[in-house]
Amino acid sequence: MSGITKETQVAVVGGGAMGAGIAQIAAAAGHQVVLYDTRTEAAEKAIAGIHRTFTMLAEKGKMSFDLAQASSKRLHLASDLQQLSKAGLVIEAIVENLGIKQALFAELENIVADDCILASNTSSISITALAAKLRLPGRFVGMHFFNPVPLMALVEIIRGLATEQAVADQLYATAQDWGKNPVHAKSTPGFIVNRVARPYYAEALRLLNEQAADPATIDLIMRESGGFRMGPFELMDMIGHDVNFAVTNTVYQAYFNDPRFTPSLLQQELLSAGYLGKKSGRGFYHYGEDAVMPQGASEAAQDAPAQVAMRGDCVVTSALAERFSNAGMTLVAATDDDDEILFSCGDARVYLCDGRTATQRAHHAQFANTIVLDLALDFLSAKRVVLAVADQCHPSARQAVIGALQAAGYAVTCMDDVAGMVVMRTVAMLANEAADAVNQGVCDVAAVDTAMQKGVNYPRGPLQWADAIGVARIVNVLQHMAAWYGEDRYRISPLLQRKKCSGRKFYD
Ligand SMILES: NC(=O)c1ccc[n+]([C@@H]2O[C@H](COP(=O)([O-])OP(=O)(O)OC[C@H]3O[C@@H](n4cnc5c(N)ncnc54)[C@H](O)[C@@H]3O)[C@@H](O)[C@H]2O)c1
């Protein structure tokens, strides 16, 4: 299936942040573009802004002057909806309101030709519901761009119940022609990204609620150990708590109050106080000229032990062994009979987090000096590693482990001893949600990973991550967390359980 032809006129309705971006990329891709906004001044402002952007791109050498000029000429202002009559594709990016959007599309159906594709950029409204009152609902489809449109590669192409597959396929090919990375999805609350990303915020909020660490420390862990571009608290502050809380609430209610999506009281408190994040000068952090950004907690330097005893041959142990040995430390083979130990030193045993607290693990193994290591994106290159220490662990054992990891070049954060720690619980819950989206036919495996990498810049797709660390490990983490918290929130996706039982990967 090919995309719409270059000769097809594209109409954009709504000249706000999203509409302007969509008009820009459609014009740059070679289409004549008509932009309409009920506030004509908004459409004028959008077109003037796009002209400036094209000039700036040409000056920076990112676009030829000829293309910039030609693209600018392809942008046209519509002062009346009737002027959209020649469009072959209309993309709506107006206010997020079902009734207002439905009224617009009803009006548009009387203006455009019967073969014109009607698309909505809605981020939360059901495509099925938006199409319900149309005369020709088969040509209606969701085309969900991400902000800022010219920079973000992802476009979710959303099919409602009535959407014809050929229409979705043609829009998918069109998004590709416009230089985007589209994915197909079925119309369900949050589509892919706004659903699968919920645990990224929710697990951090739960950790804060449990006083596991402060926001700056959790952000630091997610960046320097998890490899995420932004930590969850700084990201929520940037998005705005009004917006982020509204999305969480919409998804929660749309899934009939599924506990997996329960909003956080902490975020509601911020909203009640008017602390909306960066835009209001205060959220989890303070902003403004005099504000000092907290750095997050790191352990003070400790002496390195003489030697480290390594155990097992998993990818984590081999990466740690390489870092220890590159630092000139003496490595010996561990003699303990516990296969799950990563390494031991100074009477301490260090395990990769399996969803149990270090204290619980120490109790189960009847071994006091137990320390749990959080997951890192890549232990070979990570700047930071994170530890939780059993309550019954002796301080000297704790110091030896910190010293060994510091000698290997890691910054070390010790956090409170909570189940699932930070990166491991977040990745397990992202993979769980991604697996459920696939299991429920919202999208396929590759689409969910692409969506999370291209739509929210995750360093690795959640299902690729599950494969990399082992689906069985993810299931184990979730099982332990479900038992520890006694909440349905951590129930395991049937698809994860199936993969674990079959020993198959998502990318076999
Ligand atoms: N902002 C984002 O990050 C983002 C991301 C993805 C999707 N979306 C979705 O895109 C849509 C637009 O979002 P935005 O951030 O650009 O909003 P915005 O408030 O910046 O712009 C909306 C524009 O639509 C105009 N408008 C309102 N009702 C209209 C009507 N009936 N006919 C014509 N124009 C009308 C307004 O005058 C305004 O200029 C929403 O559905 C939103 O959920 C937003």
Image: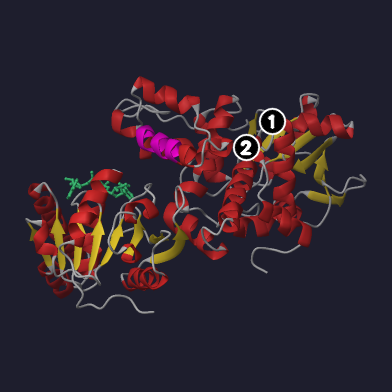
Closer to us: 404 or 358? 358
Q: Pointers 2 and 1 in contact (CB under 8 A)?
A: yes
Answer above or below: position of 386 versus 457.
above
Q: Residue 331 vs residue 335: left or right?
A: left
Q: Residue 113 vs residue 174: left or right?
A: left
The answer to whether residue 148 of the structure is visible from this angle is yes
Quadrant housing residue 240: top left
Q: Identify the amino acid type marked 2.
A: Arg
Q: Assess mark 1: CB under 8 A from ligand 1?
A: no
The answer to whether residue 307 of the structure is visible from this angle is no
Span highlighted in magenta in the image: 240-250
What residue is shown with label 1?
485
Image spot of residue 503 (x, y percent): 77, 62
Quarter containing the N terminus: bottom left
Q: Assess mark 2: CB under 8 A from ligand 1?
A: no
What residue is shown with label 2?
489
Quadrant housing residue 358: top right
Answer above or below: position of 471 versus 111.
above
Q: Identify the amino acid type marked 1.
A: Tyr
What is the basis of the colouring in this image? secondary structure
Q: What secondary structure is the magenta-colored segment mainly?
A: helix
Question: Residue at image x 70%, y 37%?
Answer: 481
Secondary element at tag 1: helix
Q: Is residue 337 magenta?
A: no
